[in-house]
Image: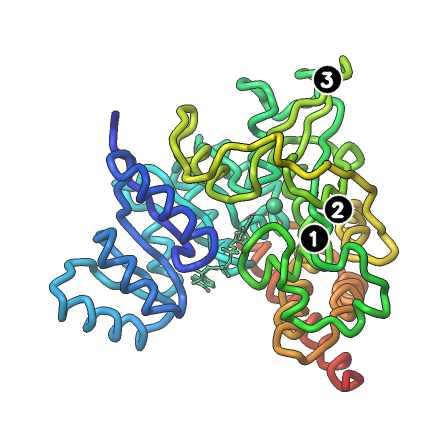
Amino acid sequence: MDIQNIVIFGSTGSIGKNVLEVVRLNAERFRVIALCANTQIDRLFDQCMEFRPLYAVVGDTGRAAFLEDRLRAVSCPTRVKWGGDALIRMAVLPEADSVIAAIVGSAGLPSTFAAAKAGKKLLLANKETLVMGGEIFMRTVRENRATLLPLDSEHNAIFQSLPHDYSGEPVRHGVESLLLTGSGGPFRASTRAEMRDATPEQACAHPNWSMGKKISVDSATLMNKGLEMIEAHWLFGVPVDRIEVVIHPQSIIHSLVRYTDGSALAELGNPDMRTPIAQALAYPERIVSGVGALDLFRLPSLCFEPPDFGRFPCLPLAYEAMRLGKSVPVALNIANELAVQAFLGRKIGFCEIPEIVESTMERMPPVVLDSMEDILLAAEEARRFAVDVIDEKMKSYS
Ligand code: NAD
Ligand code: MG
């Protein structure tokens, strides 16, 4: 068995920590050669001490110097780099076999693209890259013969439920539709009035999954399902009108593929990200993940309901962004990212998140995107529009 050299983007985050847990259980298979994070230096220091990577990357020069001093003081040989260029260099390291893209938000786009261009085995958690530039990104993956494996639990479940030789053409493989399951988040049963007063703490208290703050808020608004619908479209080539969202509060069925003969295939398990991470890390083999077996006798009854587009306007906005195409999904994603940040900073209310997304989508003139540079320019433009919209909202928020 060959040892896989892995680079982890976002090693200090929720996905990153879960990746390292799976690596720890399978130490004979994986060597961590680079750990990349932004600001959490203490955690990154501990990770460097344990995994002894060749490189560690942080967000800025001050933090790099601080980490470097601490590592030298204990004779840890890890070399410390900082900033966006260093992230790109890590994505294309010749000795890297697998790259884990687990930076949160649009900040993850350049390094994710770089790994695809370098033809790496790419384990993708950063769904925002696919939302903003799915078509261009998938072309980059194909042209450079990169291997793309989804870490998002729903997409990993769909990947496992599709034929092994699936080519991205649903009709050829008898794929009728995809059913994307979601727990419904902490406000599944809340009224609009209750949601208006929701605090960041309430929004981040996800019933089944423990995740980073941004995706937790996305799960509470259901924007996460909207982003995942777009992600599924690009990953699997299924038209958006054949991707259905199903609310399944127990999070045991992680998504389904419906076939023309009436079969519906699914992946089931306890809701724990270490399962899709282990599946993708070892693919096509299987390794232990640390997740316990699914005990059918102890399961609660499984329930399913349609999503409520009225109480959760982010979901129809995501379908609308896909219908309009061009740079509109970039506007959706950037406006959402900034609105979530403003909500977490208590500058706007929970129900203003979809309003900000909608206004930004309306105000920004759509442009055709043809390259990664086009996506980054559109993202800058979207940022300007979204900042204006948020400023207006903040003036009216008390
Ligand atoms: P998180 O907030 O817990 O961690 C984010 C990581 O990104 C941190 O390590 C942080 O240092 C790094 N980061 C942030 N900005 C950066 C920058 N500018 N440069 C370099 N590094 C930066 O987030 P998370 O919950 O782990 O989510 C990461 C990604 O995975 C997101 O795209 C999310 O949608 C996706 N995802 C997460 C889960 C989950 O269970 N947490 C599930 C499915 C998909
Ligand atoms: Mg998911």
Which residue is nearer to you in this view: 295 or 393? 295
Tell me if mark 1 has few (under 14), some (14-19) or many (20+) residues whose alpha carbon lies within 10 angstroms of its own.
many
Q: Is residue 177 above or below residue 382?
A: above
SS class of the residue under badge 1? Answer: helix
Tell me if mark 3 has few (under 14), some (14-19) or many (20+) residues whose alpha carbon lies within 10 angstroms of its own.
few
Which is closer to the viewer, label 3 or label 1?
3
Is 181 on the left or on the right of 208, as rendered?
right
User: Are the residues flagged by discs 2 and 1 in contact, CB closer than 8 Å?
Assistant: yes
Which residue is denoted by mark 2 in the rendering?
322
User: Are the residues flagged by discs 3 and 1 in contact, CB closer than 8 Å?
Assistant: no
* CB at disc 3 and ligand 2 closer than 8 Å: no
Q: Whole-percent x and y of residue 254?
A: 63, 36
Which residue is denoted by mark 3 in the rendering?
263
User: Are the residues flagged by discs 3 and 2 in contact, CB closer than 8 Å?
Assistant: no
Q: CA distance from mark 2 to mark 1?
A: 6 Å
Q: Residue furthest right?
A: 310
Q: Which corner quadrant of the image does residue 361 belong to?
A: bottom right
Dot 3 or dot 2: first in sequence order is 3
Dot 3 or dot 1: first in sequence order is 3
Q: Which mark is residue 329?
A: 1
Which residue is nearer to you in this view: 208 or 37? 208
Q: Is residue 287 visible?
A: yes
